[in-house]
Amino acid sequence: MIAAPSQGLALARDEEPAAAARTRITVKGLVKRFNASGREFVAVDDVSFEVKQGEFVALLGPSGCGKSTILNMVAGLLPRSGGRILIDGDTVETGKVNPRVGYVFQRDTLFPWRTVEQNIGYGLEIAGLPKTERAGRVASAVEKAGLSGFGQSFPRMLSGGMRQRVALMRTLILEPEILLMDEPFGALDTHTKLEMHKTLLEIWERERQTVLFVTHDLGEALTLASRIILLSARPGRLKEDFDVAIPRPRDPVGVRETAEFGRLYSHIWHSLGEEFRRTRAD
Amino acid sequence: MSHSRTVILFWQLAILAVVLVVWQWGFEWSKALLPKAYVPKILDPYFIAKPSLIWQSFLRLGCFSDAAGFTACITGSDNNLWLATLVTLKNTWWGFLFGSASGIAAGLVLGRSDFLARVFGPYIVALNSIPRIALVPLVILIFGLGDLSKIATAWLVVFFVVFFNTFEGTRAVDRDQIAAARLLGASEFTVLRTVVIPSALAWVFASLLPAVSFALIGVIVGEFIGAERGLGKLIIEAEARANASEMMVAIFVMMFVGILLAIAVRSLQSYLLRWQPQFEH
Ligand SMILES: Nc1ncnc2c1ncn2[C@@H]1O[C@H](COP(=O)(O)OP(=O)(O)OP(=O)(O)O)[C@@H](O)[C@H]1O
Ligand SMILES: [Mg+2]
Protein backbone atom coordinates (compact mmCIF):
# COMPACT_ATOMS: atom_id res chain seq x y z
CA MET A 1 0.00 0.00 0.00
CA ILE A 2 1.11 3.54 -0.68
CA ALA A 3 2.26 5.40 2.38
CA ALA A 4 0.14 8.23 3.69
CA PRO A 5 0.87 11.53 1.96
CA SER A 6 3.10 13.73 4.05
CA GLN A 7 0.41 15.73 5.69
CA GLY A 8 2.64 16.72 8.58
CA LEU A 9 4.38 19.76 7.09
CA ALA A 10 1.52 21.52 5.43
CA LEU A 11 -0.89 20.90 8.28
CA ALA A 12 1.41 21.29 11.23
CA ARG A 13 -0.29 24.45 12.48
CA ASP A 14 -3.44 23.98 10.53
CA GLU A 15 -6.73 23.46 12.28
CA GLU A 16 -8.57 21.24 9.83
CA PRO A 17 -7.20 19.17 6.97
CA ALA A 18 -7.70 20.70 3.57
CA ALA A 19 -11.10 20.11 2.01
CA ALA A 20 -9.43 17.95 -0.61
CA ALA A 21 -8.16 15.42 1.98
CA ARG A 22 -9.16 11.94 1.00
CA THR A 23 -11.78 9.94 2.85
CA ARG A 24 -10.31 7.09 4.89
CA ILE A 25 -13.32 5.71 6.72
CA THR A 26 -16.78 5.59 5.23
CA VAL A 27 -19.73 4.31 7.27
CA LYS A 28 -23.02 4.13 5.38
CA GLY A 29 -26.40 3.12 6.77
CA LEU A 30 -24.75 0.98 9.44
CA VAL A 31 -27.15 -1.23 11.41
CA LYS A 32 -26.46 -3.70 14.21
CA ARG A 33 -29.05 -5.94 15.78
CA PHE A 34 -28.35 -8.14 18.79
CA ASN A 35 -30.21 -11.13 20.09
CA ALA A 36 -30.75 -10.59 23.77
CA SER A 37 -32.41 -13.63 25.39
CA GLY A 38 -34.35 -14.52 22.27
CA ARG A 39 -35.53 -10.97 21.66
CA GLU A 40 -33.91 -9.01 18.88
CA PHE A 41 -33.02 -5.41 19.58
CA VAL A 42 -31.42 -2.70 17.51
CA ALA A 43 -28.17 -1.40 19.01
CA VAL A 44 -27.04 0.74 16.08
CA ASP A 45 -29.61 2.24 13.77
CA ASP A 46 -28.72 3.62 10.35
CA VAL A 47 -25.51 5.45 11.23
CA SER A 48 -23.55 7.17 8.47
CA PHE A 49 -20.43 9.30 8.62
CA GLU A 50 -17.06 9.78 7.03
CA VAL A 51 -13.61 10.36 8.45
CA LYS A 52 -11.04 12.10 6.31
CA GLN A 53 -7.28 11.76 6.26
CA GLY A 54 -5.70 13.29 9.36
CA GLU A 55 -8.95 14.02 11.18
CA PHE A 56 -9.34 13.35 14.88
CA VAL A 57 -12.99 12.40 15.26
CA ALA A 58 -14.62 11.70 18.60
CA LEU A 59 -17.65 9.44 18.69
CA LEU A 60 -19.55 10.76 21.68
CA GLY A 61 -22.68 9.36 23.27
CA PRO A 62 -24.21 8.09 26.48
CA SER A 63 -23.13 4.74 27.87
CA GLY A 64 -24.68 1.79 26.07
CA CYS A 65 -25.58 3.72 22.93
CA GLY A 66 -23.49 1.46 20.72
CA LYS A 67 -20.18 3.30 20.44
CA SER A 68 -18.02 0.23 21.00
CA THR A 69 -20.29 -1.74 18.71
CA ILE A 70 -19.73 0.75 15.88
CA LEU A 71 -15.97 0.85 16.45
CA ASN A 72 -15.75 -2.95 16.53
CA MET A 73 -17.55 -3.18 13.23
CA VAL A 74 -15.18 -0.61 11.73
CA ALA A 75 -12.27 -2.71 13.03
CA GLY A 76 -13.78 -5.86 11.51
CA LEU A 77 -14.14 -7.49 14.92
CA LEU A 78 -17.91 -7.73 14.73
CA PRO A 79 -20.18 -8.62 11.80
CA ARG A 80 -22.69 -5.94 10.84
CA SER A 81 -26.39 -6.52 10.36
CA GLY A 82 -26.73 -3.96 7.60
CA GLY A 83 -25.03 -1.08 5.82
CA ARG A 84 -21.49 -0.67 4.58
CA ILE A 85 -18.11 0.20 5.99
CA LEU A 86 -15.21 1.13 3.73
CA ILE A 87 -11.63 1.82 4.68
CA ASP A 88 -9.69 3.52 1.90
CA GLY A 89 -12.46 2.44 -0.43
CA ASP A 90 -12.28 -1.25 0.46
CA THR A 91 -15.15 -2.97 2.21
CA VAL A 92 -14.23 -4.10 5.72
CA GLU A 93 -14.40 -7.88 6.08
CA THR A 94 -15.15 -9.32 9.48
CA GLY A 95 -12.24 -11.26 10.90
CA LYS A 96 -9.76 -9.79 8.46
CA VAL A 97 -7.17 -7.52 10.00
CA ASN A 98 -6.14 -4.40 8.15
CA PRO A 99 -2.47 -3.64 8.91
CA ARG A 100 -3.07 0.07 8.37
CA VAL A 101 -5.54 0.12 11.24
CA GLY A 102 -4.55 0.18 14.91
CA TYR A 103 -6.96 -0.45 17.77
CA VAL A 104 -6.78 0.49 21.44
CA PHE A 105 -9.20 -1.29 23.73
CA GLN A 106 -11.57 0.00 26.40
CA ARG A 107 -10.37 -2.79 28.70
CA ASP A 108 -6.80 -3.54 29.70
CA THR A 109 -5.61 -6.12 27.19
CA LEU A 110 -1.90 -6.14 27.88
CA PHE A 111 -0.30 -9.58 28.02
CA PRO A 112 0.50 -10.00 31.72
CA TRP A 113 3.19 -12.61 31.04
CA ARG A 114 5.19 -10.19 28.90
CA THR A 115 7.31 -7.35 30.18
CA VAL A 116 6.62 -3.77 29.11
CA GLU A 117 9.21 -4.07 26.34
CA GLN A 118 7.87 -7.41 25.19
CA ASN A 119 4.33 -6.04 25.14
CA ILE A 120 5.31 -2.99 23.12
CA GLY A 121 7.43 -5.10 20.78
CA TYR A 122 4.74 -7.76 20.29
CA GLY A 123 3.58 -6.65 16.85
CA LEU A 124 7.13 -6.24 15.55
CA GLU A 125 8.14 -9.59 17.01
CA ILE A 126 5.37 -11.59 15.36
CA ALA A 127 6.00 -9.73 12.12
CA GLY A 128 9.49 -11.25 12.26
CA LEU A 129 11.51 -8.06 12.65
CA PRO A 130 15.12 -8.88 13.61
CA LYS A 131 15.84 -8.60 17.30
CA THR A 132 18.39 -5.81 17.11
CA GLU A 133 16.19 -3.59 14.96
CA ARG A 134 13.24 -4.31 17.22
CA ALA A 135 15.15 -3.43 20.37
CA GLY A 136 15.96 0.04 19.04
CA ARG A 137 12.38 0.84 18.10
CA VAL A 138 11.02 -0.58 21.36
CA ALA A 139 13.49 1.44 23.40
CA SER A 140 12.48 4.68 21.73
CA ALA A 141 8.78 3.82 22.16
CA VAL A 142 9.35 3.12 25.86
CA GLU A 143 10.96 6.50 26.19
CA LYS A 144 8.29 8.29 24.17
CA ALA A 145 5.68 6.83 26.53
CA GLY A 146 7.59 8.14 29.54
CA LEU A 147 8.24 4.62 30.79
CA SER A 148 12.03 4.71 30.96
CA GLY A 149 13.26 2.34 33.62
CA PHE A 150 10.13 0.19 33.45
CA GLY A 151 11.04 -1.77 30.32
CA GLN A 152 11.64 -4.97 32.25
CA SER A 153 8.59 -4.63 34.51
CA PHE A 154 5.53 -6.79 34.16
CA PRO A 155 2.19 -5.01 33.64
CA ARG A 156 0.88 -5.79 37.12
CA MET A 157 3.72 -3.71 38.60
CA LEU A 158 2.48 -0.63 36.76
CA SER A 159 -0.25 1.87 37.53
CA GLY A 160 -3.36 2.05 35.36
CA GLY A 161 -2.05 5.08 33.51
CA MET A 162 1.29 3.45 32.77
CA ARG A 163 -0.45 0.31 31.55
CA GLN A 164 -2.55 2.35 29.17
CA ARG A 165 0.60 4.05 27.87
CA VAL A 166 2.03 0.62 27.14
CA ALA A 167 -1.17 -0.38 25.35
CA LEU A 168 -1.03 2.82 23.30
CA MET A 169 2.61 2.25 22.35
CA ARG A 170 1.99 -1.42 21.53
CA THR A 171 -0.41 -0.16 18.86
CA LEU A 172 1.49 2.97 17.77
CA ILE A 173 4.81 1.20 17.25
CA LEU A 174 3.30 -0.49 14.19
CA GLU A 175 2.71 3.01 12.80
CA PRO A 176 -0.94 2.59 11.87
CA GLU A 177 -2.32 5.32 9.62
CA ILE A 178 -5.76 4.90 11.12
CA LEU A 179 -6.27 4.65 14.88
CA LEU A 180 -9.44 3.31 16.44
CA MET A 181 -9.64 3.99 20.16
CA ASP A 182 -12.37 2.75 22.47
CA GLU A 183 -12.45 4.88 25.63
CA PRO A 184 -8.78 4.12 26.20
CA PHE A 185 -8.66 6.38 29.25
CA GLY A 186 -12.09 5.56 30.64
CA ALA A 187 -10.75 3.70 33.65
CA LEU A 188 -8.26 6.37 34.72
CA ASP A 189 -8.54 9.05 37.40
CA THR A 190 -8.86 12.68 36.31
CA HIS A 191 -5.22 13.59 36.82
CA THR A 192 -3.84 10.57 34.99
CA LYS A 193 -6.40 11.11 32.27
CA LEU A 194 -5.16 14.66 31.69
CA GLU A 195 -1.60 13.40 31.45
CA MET A 196 -2.67 10.80 28.91
CA HIS A 197 -4.44 13.51 26.93
CA LYS A 198 -1.21 15.47 26.88
CA THR A 199 0.75 12.47 25.63
CA LEU A 200 -1.82 11.64 22.96
CA LEU A 201 -2.08 15.26 21.79
CA GLU A 202 1.69 15.50 21.45
CA ILE A 203 1.85 12.32 19.42
CA TRP A 204 -1.13 13.16 17.25
CA GLU A 205 -0.15 16.76 16.60
CA ARG A 206 3.21 15.47 15.40
CA GLU A 207 2.07 12.45 13.40
CA ARG A 208 -1.50 13.30 12.43
CA GLN A 209 -2.93 9.83 12.19
CA THR A 210 -6.55 9.48 11.23
CA VAL A 211 -8.31 8.87 14.53
CA LEU A 212 -11.75 7.62 15.50
CA PHE A 213 -11.97 8.01 19.24
CA VAL A 214 -14.91 6.65 21.24
CA THR A 215 -15.82 8.32 24.52
CA HIS A 216 -18.73 9.29 26.71
CA ASP A 217 -16.65 12.03 28.34
CA LEU A 218 -17.60 15.39 26.88
CA GLY A 219 -14.48 17.19 28.17
CA GLU A 220 -12.25 14.51 26.70
CA ALA A 221 -13.90 14.77 23.29
CA LEU A 222 -13.53 18.56 23.25
CA THR A 223 -9.91 18.40 24.42
CA LEU A 224 -8.74 15.95 21.80
CA ALA A 225 -10.96 15.98 18.77
CA SER A 226 -11.15 18.14 15.68
CA ARG A 227 -14.68 16.92 15.06
CA ILE A 228 -17.35 15.38 17.26
CA ILE A 229 -20.03 12.96 16.15
CA LEU A 230 -22.80 12.92 18.71
CA LEU A 231 -24.88 9.76 19.01
CA SER A 232 -28.33 9.44 20.51
CA ALA A 233 -29.14 7.07 23.35
CA ARG A 234 -30.03 3.47 22.53
CA PRO A 235 -30.50 2.65 19.74
CA GLY A 236 -27.46 4.61 18.57
CA ARG A 237 -28.39 7.09 15.87
CA LEU A 238 -26.50 10.04 14.49
CA LYS A 239 -27.61 13.14 16.33
CA GLU A 240 -25.13 15.88 15.51
CA ASP A 241 -21.82 16.30 13.75
CA PHE A 242 -19.74 19.43 14.27
CA ASP A 243 -16.18 20.76 14.22
CA VAL A 244 -14.20 21.72 17.28
CA ALA A 245 -12.39 24.90 16.30
CA ILE A 246 -9.97 25.10 19.21
CA PRO A 247 -6.51 25.99 17.90
CA ARG A 248 -3.57 23.60 18.15
CA PRO A 249 -1.23 22.75 19.70
CA ARG A 250 -3.65 22.22 22.52
CA ASP A 251 -2.94 21.90 26.17
CA PRO A 252 -5.39 19.67 28.05
CA VAL A 253 -5.80 22.22 30.84
CA GLY A 254 -5.55 25.33 28.68
CA VAL A 255 -8.29 24.27 26.25
CA ARG A 256 -10.80 24.43 29.06
CA GLU A 257 -10.30 28.17 29.27
CA THR A 258 -11.03 28.87 25.61
CA ALA A 259 -14.37 30.39 24.65
CA GLU A 260 -14.97 27.66 22.07
CA PHE A 261 -14.64 24.95 24.71
CA GLY A 262 -17.22 26.64 26.94
CA ARG A 263 -19.64 27.27 24.11
CA LEU A 264 -19.50 23.71 22.75
CA TYR A 265 -19.53 22.23 26.21
CA SER A 266 -22.85 23.80 27.16
CA HIS A 267 -24.31 23.10 23.74
CA ILE A 268 -23.45 19.41 23.83
CA TRP A 269 -24.32 19.21 27.49
CA HIS A 270 -27.91 20.17 26.71
CA SER A 271 -28.01 17.93 23.71
CA LEU A 272 -26.62 14.99 25.73
CA GLY A 273 -28.92 15.86 28.61
CA GLU A 274 -31.91 15.10 26.43
CA GLU A 275 -30.35 11.74 25.65
CA PHE A 276 -29.77 10.91 29.28
CA ARG A 277 -33.33 11.82 30.11
CA ARG A 278 -34.47 9.53 27.30
CA THR A 279 -32.32 6.69 28.60
CA ARG A 280 -33.80 7.03 32.03
CA ALA A 281 -37.32 7.28 30.69
CA ASP A 282 -36.88 3.90 29.00
CA MET B 1 0.59 -13.42 63.72
CA SER B 2 4.01 -14.32 62.42
CA HIS B 3 6.57 -16.37 64.24
CA SER B 4 10.25 -16.20 63.52
CA ARG B 5 11.81 -18.87 61.35
CA THR B 6 13.87 -20.26 64.20
CA VAL B 7 10.80 -20.82 66.37
CA ILE B 8 9.06 -22.65 63.54
CA LEU B 9 12.17 -24.71 62.85
CA PHE B 10 12.53 -25.54 66.53
CA TRP B 11 9.03 -26.97 66.71
CA GLN B 12 9.46 -28.88 63.48
CA LEU B 13 12.63 -30.52 64.76
CA ALA B 14 11.02 -31.17 68.16
CA ILE B 15 8.12 -33.02 66.54
CA LEU B 16 10.52 -35.05 64.42
CA ALA B 17 12.57 -35.98 67.49
CA VAL B 18 9.50 -37.04 69.48
CA VAL B 19 8.20 -39.18 66.63
CA LEU B 20 11.58 -40.87 66.15
CA VAL B 21 12.04 -41.51 69.86
CA VAL B 22 8.56 -42.96 70.34
CA TRP B 23 8.98 -45.05 67.22
CA GLN B 24 12.36 -46.38 68.33
CA TRP B 25 11.71 -47.08 72.03
CA GLY B 26 7.98 -46.57 72.56
CA PHE B 27 7.05 -50.24 72.36
CA GLU B 28 9.74 -51.42 74.82
CA TRP B 29 8.97 -48.62 77.25
CA SER B 30 5.24 -49.24 77.20
CA LYS B 31 5.84 -53.00 77.62
CA ALA B 32 8.01 -52.28 80.66
CA LEU B 33 5.66 -49.70 82.18
CA LEU B 34 2.10 -50.67 81.23
CA PRO B 35 -0.03 -53.74 81.96
CA LYS B 36 -0.04 -56.10 78.97
CA ALA B 37 -3.56 -55.22 77.85
CA TYR B 38 -2.66 -51.55 77.46
CA VAL B 39 0.47 -51.94 75.38
CA PRO B 40 -0.27 -50.28 72.00
CA LYS B 41 0.15 -53.00 69.36
CA ILE B 42 0.58 -50.39 66.67
CA LEU B 43 4.01 -49.59 68.09
CA ASP B 44 5.16 -53.18 67.64
CA PRO B 45 8.31 -53.15 65.46
CA TYR B 46 6.96 -56.27 63.76
CA PHE B 47 4.41 -54.01 62.06
CA ILE B 48 6.12 -50.68 61.79
CA ALA B 49 9.79 -51.59 62.21
CA LYS B 50 11.85 -48.97 63.99
CA PRO B 51 14.31 -46.29 62.93
CA SER B 52 17.44 -48.24 63.78
CA LEU B 53 16.24 -51.33 61.89
CA ILE B 54 15.16 -49.22 58.95
CA TRP B 55 18.59 -47.64 58.84
CA GLN B 56 20.23 -51.06 58.81
CA SER B 57 17.91 -52.27 56.06
CA PHE B 58 18.71 -49.13 54.12
CA LEU B 59 22.43 -49.81 54.38
CA ARG B 60 21.95 -53.42 53.33
CA LEU B 61 19.53 -52.77 50.45
CA GLY B 62 21.59 -49.81 49.35
CA CYS B 63 24.75 -51.97 49.21
CA PHE B 64 26.54 -49.87 51.82
CA SER B 65 27.08 -52.67 54.34
CA ASP B 66 28.25 -55.34 51.96
CA ALA B 67 31.74 -56.63 52.60
CA ALA B 68 32.07 -57.75 48.98
CA GLY B 69 32.02 -54.10 47.98
CA PHE B 70 29.53 -51.66 46.57
CA THR B 71 29.85 -52.53 42.89
CA ALA B 72 29.67 -56.27 43.42
CA CYS B 73 26.47 -55.81 45.42
CA ILE B 74 24.94 -53.45 42.89
CA THR B 75 25.59 -55.75 39.97
CA GLY B 76 24.81 -58.86 41.98
CA SER B 77 21.15 -58.26 42.70
CA ASP B 78 18.63 -57.28 40.06
CA ASN B 79 16.33 -55.27 42.30
CA ASN B 80 18.62 -53.54 44.75
CA LEU B 81 17.55 -50.18 46.14
CA TRP B 82 19.45 -48.15 43.59
CA LEU B 83 18.19 -50.00 40.59
CA ALA B 84 14.64 -50.08 41.95
CA THR B 85 14.69 -46.32 42.59
CA LEU B 86 16.12 -45.62 39.18
CA VAL B 87 13.52 -47.77 37.45
CA THR B 88 10.62 -46.24 39.35
CA LEU B 89 11.93 -42.73 38.79
CA LYS B 90 12.45 -43.35 35.10
CA ASN B 91 8.97 -44.78 34.59
CA THR B 92 7.40 -41.99 36.61
CA TRP B 93 9.25 -39.40 34.56
CA TRP B 94 8.24 -40.83 31.19
CA GLY B 95 4.67 -41.43 32.29
CA PHE B 96 4.48 -37.88 33.57
CA LEU B 97 6.07 -36.47 30.43
CA PHE B 98 3.87 -38.36 27.95
CA GLY B 99 0.79 -37.89 30.10
CA SER B 100 1.19 -34.16 30.51
CA ALA B 101 2.33 -33.57 26.92
CA SER B 102 -0.67 -35.40 25.48
CA GLY B 103 -2.98 -33.87 28.09
CA ILE B 104 -1.81 -30.37 27.19
CA ALA B 105 -2.08 -31.03 23.46
CA ALA B 106 -5.59 -32.50 23.72
CA GLY B 107 -6.69 -29.74 26.11
CA LEU B 108 -5.49 -27.02 23.73
CA VAL B 109 -7.09 -28.57 20.67
CA LEU B 110 -10.45 -29.20 22.32
CA GLY B 111 -10.31 -25.89 24.16
CA ARG B 112 -9.89 -24.00 20.90
CA SER B 113 -12.49 -25.96 18.95
CA ASP B 114 -16.11 -25.88 20.06
CA PHE B 115 -16.94 -28.57 17.53
CA LEU B 116 -14.38 -31.09 18.77
CA ALA B 117 -15.14 -30.25 22.41
CA ARG B 118 -18.78 -31.09 21.88
CA VAL B 119 -18.05 -34.27 19.91
CA PHE B 120 -15.52 -35.67 22.39
CA GLY B 121 -16.97 -34.20 25.58
CA PRO B 122 -19.17 -37.17 26.63
CA TYR B 123 -16.46 -39.73 25.84
CA ILE B 124 -13.92 -37.91 27.95
CA VAL B 125 -16.31 -37.58 30.87
CA ALA B 126 -17.16 -41.30 30.59
CA LEU B 127 -13.53 -42.42 30.41
CA ASN B 128 -12.61 -40.13 33.27
CA SER B 129 -15.17 -41.71 35.55
CA ILE B 130 -13.42 -45.10 35.34
CA PRO B 131 -11.26 -45.50 38.45
CA ARG B 132 -7.80 -45.64 36.91
CA ILE B 133 -6.63 -48.39 39.26
CA ALA B 134 -9.24 -50.72 37.77
CA LEU B 135 -7.44 -50.49 34.45
CA VAL B 136 -4.02 -51.49 35.74
CA PRO B 137 -4.43 -55.28 35.32
CA LEU B 138 -5.64 -54.66 31.79
CA VAL B 139 -2.68 -52.42 31.07
CA ILE B 140 -0.32 -55.11 32.36
CA LEU B 141 -2.07 -57.70 30.23
CA ILE B 142 -1.55 -55.54 27.18
CA PHE B 143 1.94 -54.16 27.83
CA GLY B 144 3.47 -56.97 29.87
CA LEU B 145 5.34 -56.97 33.16
CA GLY B 146 8.07 -54.63 31.94
CA ASP B 147 8.47 -50.86 32.21
CA LEU B 148 6.05 -50.08 29.41
CA SER B 149 3.00 -51.06 31.44
CA LYS B 150 4.12 -48.77 34.29
CA ILE B 151 4.62 -45.85 31.97
CA ALA B 152 1.19 -46.53 30.46
CA THR B 153 -0.42 -46.60 33.90
CA ALA B 154 1.19 -43.31 34.89
CA TRP B 155 0.13 -41.87 31.54
CA LEU B 156 -3.49 -42.87 32.17
CA VAL B 157 -3.53 -41.12 35.52
CA VAL B 158 -1.71 -37.98 34.42
CA PHE B 159 -3.44 -37.44 31.09
CA PHE B 160 -6.91 -36.66 32.37
CA VAL B 161 -5.81 -34.38 35.19
CA VAL B 162 -3.68 -32.29 32.86
CA PHE B 163 -6.21 -32.45 30.04
CA PHE B 164 -9.07 -31.04 32.10
CA ASN B 165 -7.00 -28.20 33.47
CA THR B 166 -5.56 -27.27 30.11
CA PHE B 167 -9.02 -27.37 28.58
CA GLU B 168 -10.45 -25.07 31.25
CA GLY B 169 -7.41 -22.80 31.02
CA THR B 170 -7.81 -22.53 27.27
CA ARG B 171 -11.47 -21.71 27.68
CA ALA B 172 -10.69 -19.02 30.21
CA VAL B 173 -8.34 -17.06 27.94
CA ASP B 174 -9.39 -13.41 27.73
CA ARG B 175 -11.20 -12.90 24.42
CA ASP B 176 -10.09 -9.30 24.23
CA GLN B 177 -6.47 -10.35 24.57
CA ILE B 178 -6.96 -12.66 21.60
CA ALA B 179 -8.64 -9.85 19.67
CA ALA B 180 -5.78 -7.51 20.60
CA ALA B 181 -3.22 -10.01 19.32
CA ARG B 182 -5.12 -10.48 16.08
CA LEU B 183 -5.34 -6.72 15.57
CA LEU B 184 -1.58 -6.52 16.08
CA GLY B 185 -1.17 -8.95 13.20
CA ALA B 186 -1.15 -12.39 14.83
CA SER B 187 -2.29 -15.41 12.80
CA GLU B 188 -4.42 -18.13 14.37
CA PHE B 189 -1.30 -20.15 15.13
CA THR B 190 0.56 -17.15 16.54
CA VAL B 191 -2.40 -16.43 18.80
CA LEU B 192 -2.19 -20.00 20.07
CA ARG B 193 1.55 -19.76 20.66
CA THR B 194 1.76 -16.27 22.12
CA VAL B 195 -1.57 -15.79 23.89
CA VAL B 196 -3.49 -19.01 24.51
CA ILE B 197 -0.58 -21.13 25.71
CA PRO B 198 1.04 -18.58 28.03
CA SER B 199 -2.34 -17.64 29.43
CA ALA B 200 -3.40 -21.26 30.00
CA LEU B 201 -0.03 -22.09 31.51
CA ALA B 202 -1.07 -21.09 35.01
CA TRP B 203 -3.92 -23.61 34.81
CA VAL B 204 -1.67 -26.25 33.32
CA PHE B 205 0.83 -25.90 36.14
CA ALA B 206 -1.88 -26.05 38.74
CA SER B 207 -2.40 -29.61 37.50
CA LEU B 208 1.24 -30.58 36.98
CA LEU B 209 2.08 -30.59 40.66
CA PRO B 210 -0.60 -33.16 41.58
CA ALA B 211 0.08 -34.92 38.26
CA VAL B 212 3.65 -35.71 39.20
CA SER B 213 2.46 -37.35 42.43
CA PHE B 214 -0.20 -39.22 40.49
CA ALA B 215 2.41 -40.47 38.06
CA LEU B 216 4.40 -41.88 40.96
CA ILE B 217 1.27 -43.50 42.40
CA GLY B 218 0.43 -44.97 39.01
CA VAL B 219 3.87 -46.51 38.62
CA ILE B 220 3.91 -47.95 42.17
CA VAL B 221 0.46 -49.48 41.78
CA GLY B 222 1.57 -50.97 38.49
CA GLU B 223 4.59 -52.44 40.23
CA PHE B 224 2.39 -53.86 43.00
CA ILE B 225 0.20 -55.68 40.56
CA GLY B 226 2.87 -57.07 38.31
CA ALA B 227 6.48 -56.11 37.84
CA GLU B 228 10.02 -57.37 37.75
CA ARG B 229 11.72 -54.31 39.19
CA GLY B 230 11.04 -51.06 40.98
CA LEU B 231 10.29 -49.71 44.45
CA GLY B 232 6.76 -51.13 44.41
CA LYS B 233 8.16 -54.54 43.62
CA LEU B 234 10.62 -54.11 46.52
CA ILE B 235 7.69 -53.54 48.88
CA ILE B 236 5.87 -56.61 47.60
CA GLU B 237 9.00 -58.71 48.09
CA ALA B 238 9.46 -57.37 51.63
CA GLU B 239 5.82 -58.08 52.38
CA ALA B 240 6.30 -61.70 51.32
CA ARG B 241 9.05 -61.97 53.92
CA ALA B 242 7.03 -59.94 56.47
CA ASN B 243 9.93 -57.50 56.63
CA ALA B 244 8.51 -54.18 57.75
CA SER B 245 11.83 -52.35 57.86
CA GLU B 246 12.54 -53.02 54.19
CA MET B 247 9.10 -51.77 53.29
CA MET B 248 9.81 -48.64 55.28
CA VAL B 249 13.04 -48.10 53.37
CA ALA B 250 11.15 -48.26 50.08
CA ILE B 251 8.46 -45.93 51.44
CA PHE B 252 11.01 -43.36 52.56
CA VAL B 253 12.78 -43.49 49.23
CA MET B 254 9.42 -42.93 47.50
CA MET B 255 8.83 -39.94 49.70
CA PHE B 256 12.21 -38.60 48.73
CA VAL B 257 11.57 -39.22 45.04
CA GLY B 258 8.17 -37.52 45.33
CA ILE B 259 9.71 -34.47 46.96
CA LEU B 260 12.43 -34.22 44.31
CA LEU B 261 9.93 -34.40 41.46
CA ALA B 262 7.70 -31.80 43.10
CA ILE B 263 10.66 -29.46 43.56
CA ALA B 264 11.61 -29.88 39.91
CA VAL B 265 8.09 -29.03 38.71
CA ARG B 266 7.84 -26.14 41.13
CA SER B 267 11.02 -24.47 40.05
CA LEU B 268 10.00 -24.76 36.40
CA GLN B 269 6.63 -23.30 37.35
CA SER B 270 8.03 -20.35 39.22
CA TYR B 271 10.31 -19.56 36.29
CA LEU B 272 7.62 -19.78 33.61
CA LEU B 273 4.99 -18.01 35.69
CA ARG B 274 7.29 -15.33 37.09
CA TRP B 275 4.88 -12.69 35.79
CA GLN B 276 2.37 -13.76 38.45
CA PRO B 277 2.54 -12.11 41.86
CA GLN B 278 2.87 -15.31 43.89
CA PHE B 279 6.00 -16.30 41.99
CA GLU B 280 7.71 -12.94 42.21
CA HIS B 281 11.35 -13.25 43.20
N1 LIG C 1 -22.56 -9.28 22.17
C1 LIG C 1 -23.67 -8.62 22.54
N2 LIG C 1 -24.84 -9.27 22.66
C2 LIG C 1 -25.97 -8.62 23.02
N3 LIG C 1 -26.01 -7.32 23.28
C3 LIG C 1 -24.88 -6.59 23.18
C4 LIG C 1 -23.65 -7.21 22.81
N4 LIG C 1 -22.68 -6.26 22.79
C5 LIG C 1 -23.28 -5.11 23.15
N5 LIG C 1 -24.61 -5.30 23.37
C6 LIG C 1 -25.58 -4.26 23.73
O1 LIG C 1 -25.55 -3.26 22.74
C7 LIG C 1 -25.64 -1.98 23.32
C8 LIG C 1 -24.46 -1.13 22.91
O2 LIG C 1 -23.29 -1.65 23.50
P1 LIG C 1 -21.87 -0.94 23.39
O3 LIG C 1 -20.90 -1.77 24.12
O4 LIG C 1 -21.58 -0.65 21.96
O5 LIG C 1 -22.13 0.42 24.17
P2 LIG C 1 -21.12 1.62 24.42
O6 LIG C 1 -21.72 2.81 23.80
O7 LIG C 1 -19.76 1.25 24.01
O8 LIG C 1 -21.19 1.78 25.99
P3 LIG C 1 -20.04 2.16 27.04
O9 LIG C 1 -19.81 3.61 26.94
O10 LIG C 1 -20.64 1.80 28.36
O11 LIG C 1 -18.86 1.35 26.69
C9 LIG C 1 -25.72 -2.20 24.81
O12 LIG C 1 -27.08 -2.10 25.19
C10 LIG C 1 -25.23 -3.58 25.03
O13 LIG C 1 -25.88 -4.17 26.11
MG1 LIG D 1 -17.99 0.74 25.05
Image (cartoon, coloured by chain):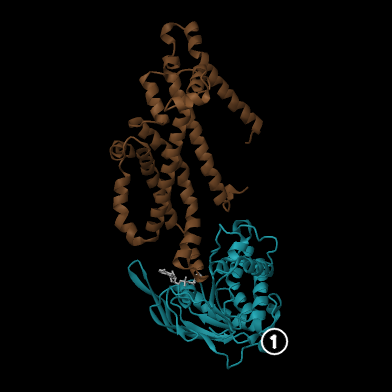
Chain colours: A cyan, B brown
What chain letter is assigned to the residue under label 1?
A
Please provide percent x and percent y for residue B77: 43, 25
Left or right: B208, with A266 as reference point: left
Please provide percent x and percent y for residue B97: 44, 46
**Can you say whether B235 is above or below A179 in the image?**
above
Ligand 1 lies under 8 Å from the Cβ of mark 1? no
Residue A9 seen by the camera: yes
Please provide percent x and percent y for residue A62: 51, 74
Residue A185 seen by the camera: no
Q: Nearer the viewer, residue B205 or A204?
A: B205
- Residue B76: image quadrant is top left
**Mark 1: few, some, or many residues within 10 Å (few <14, many ≥20)?**
few
**Can you say whether B60 is above or below B133 in the image?**
above
Quadrant housing the N terminus of chain B = top right
Q: Residue furthest bottom?
A: A20
Left or right: A50, with A78 as reference point: right
**Can you say whether B26 is above or below B102 in the image?**
above
Residue depicted at 30% across the width and 42% down the height: B130
Reading the image, the residue beneath label 1 is A13
Q: Nearer the viewer, residue B59 or B175?
A: B59
- Residue A47: image quadrant is bottom left
Label 1 sits on a secondary structure element that is loop
- The amino acid type found where label 1 is placed reads Arg
Residue depicted at 32% across the width and 50% down the height: B124
Please provide percent x and percent y for residue A254: 71, 77
Q: How many marks?
A: 1
Q: Nearer the viewer, residue B104 or A226?
A: B104
Residue depicted at 58% across the width and 73% down the height: A174
